[in-house]
Amino acid sequence: MSNNPGFDCRKDFPILERKIHGKELIYLDNAASTQTPRQVVDTIGAMYFTHKANVHRGVHTLSMEATGLQEAARAKVADFIGSPTTEQIIFTRGTTEAINLVASSYGELLNEGDEVILTQMEHHANIVPWQLLSQRRGIVIKVVPITANGQLDMDAFKSLFSPRTKVVSVCHVSNVLGTINPIKEIIDMAHRHGAVAVIDGAQAIAHIKVDVKALDADFYLFSSHKMYGPCGVGVLYGRKELLEKMPPYQGGGEMISHVSFERTTYADLPYKFEAGTPDYVDIAALTTAIDYISGIGLDRIAQHEHDLLQYTTEKMLQIPGMRIFGTAPGKSAVISFLIGNEHHYDIGLLLDKLGIAVRTGHHCAQPLMQALGIEGTVRASMAVYNTREECDNFIAALNRVASMLG
Ligand code: PLP
């Protein structure tokens, strides 16, 4: 394997051979969803064609095989993020459901007037569940501001703590600014104030080595579709003592120990939080996605993406009128930008005509857009299969778009 995983792994992603409007596809919308390698799709096929049967409910061979594959995925995830046990790994539909689970269930343990600290750079998925909780239980939401280059204002952060602070919920990496937050420092700070730390790892998990034990995170959550895995699966890691005292999130099959009309007792972890039939097909395929990432190595992936980020940013800044939002040192390979006062939508549409897939809009971060004083941005985000050649073509396309828009 060469030092550039981008070139080596492209053959695993047939979608990258597509043409869009007659042009080679350049896929730079990886922060929204990464593409899925053939190996992961093969696992999905094998699950459907060879092992499909509902999990945990049968003594027959197929059911036991499917159950074994689902539980192997749980062990794989636990190992990947350094969870001390598999019972602390709960499968959800994604990051959004995982945050809703924590806000709803851990939220039941909070009282009116208790405080939750969020930050100005959160995705709506880490804002709205807490607002819903606030409406139900009268908790108070406090918001950490950001600095001019898109970092958390850590002095302001410290000043927001009070004896009523019970939860700090922060993204590991901003999906708009690419800022990598100092989450170890944040988690330690939360603990010193007797609060729990919820870390939204949606934008970190495929780019940074995560060790929940070393971080001492209380909750860490992420989505499979952003880590070369299938859609429809997410992970909630939780500290065991907390998960044990939290009430179930949803009721139904699988999460019970015994049911009568008078009283129901609940299953042990992790099943207490996994009501109904899980997406065991895609959960099994998540194992393959993790093997895929580990096979290349997160360090190599990070190095490659960093190289592309530096290379592209330098060239972008030579384009007249270029405005990049988020310039924190050591940031992740996410570039949000505008050209002059042109509308993000127009830039995105013209780039699409040139075969380039970028995201436009508020990126589910409207409060951040308000803080930046804009409606939206264009966002280019890199992954392991992107290449310098693609970045050159992206820059050439940007120059064309800039001159077309005048
Ligand atoms: N949090 C962050 C930082 C994100 O970037 C995203 C998705 O873009 C989410 C949460 C929500 O993830 P999902 O839609 O997979 O639940």
Image: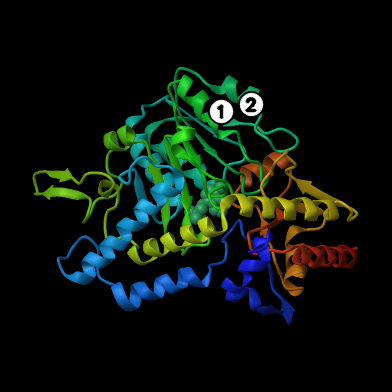
Q: Which mark is residue 154?
A: 2
**Residue found 50% across the figure and 60% down from its top:** 225
Three-letter amino acid code at the position of disc 1: Glu
Query: In the structure shown, which secondary structural element does the residue marked by tag 2 occupy?
Result: helix
Above or below, 223 against 263 in this view is below
* Residue 193 in the image, given as x and y percentages of width and height: 47, 20
**Residue found 72% across the figure and 76% down from its top:** 24
| Marks 2/1: CA–CA distance | 10 Å
Whether residue 315 is visible to the viewer of this picture, yes or no, is: yes
Number of residues whose C-alpha sits closer than 10 Å to that of mark 2, classed few (under 14), some (14–19) or many (20 or more): some
Q: In this view, does 294 lie to the left or right of 368?
A: left
| Residues at marks 2 and 1 touching, judged by CB atoms closer than 8 Å | yes
Q: In this view, does 6 lie to the left or right of 261?
A: right
**Residue found 81% across the figure and 64% down from its top:** 392
Number of residues whose C-alpha sits closer than 10 Å to that of mark 1, classed few (under 14), some (14–19) or many (20 or more): few
Three-letter amino acid code at the position of disc 2: Met
Assign the N terminus to one quadrant of the image: bottom right
Residue at the disc numbered 1: 185
Q: Does the residue labelled 1 lie within 8 Å of ligand 1?
A: no
Determine which quarter of the picture holds residue 71.
bottom left
Between 354 and 375, the residue placed more toward the observer is 354
Assign the C terminus to one quadrant of the image: bottom right
Instruction: In the displayed orientation, state which residue is furthest to the front.
Output: 1
* Residue 221 in the image, given as x and y percentages of width and height: 45, 46
Q: In this view, does 206 lie to the left or right of 84?
A: right
For marks 2 and 1, the one nearer the N-term is 2
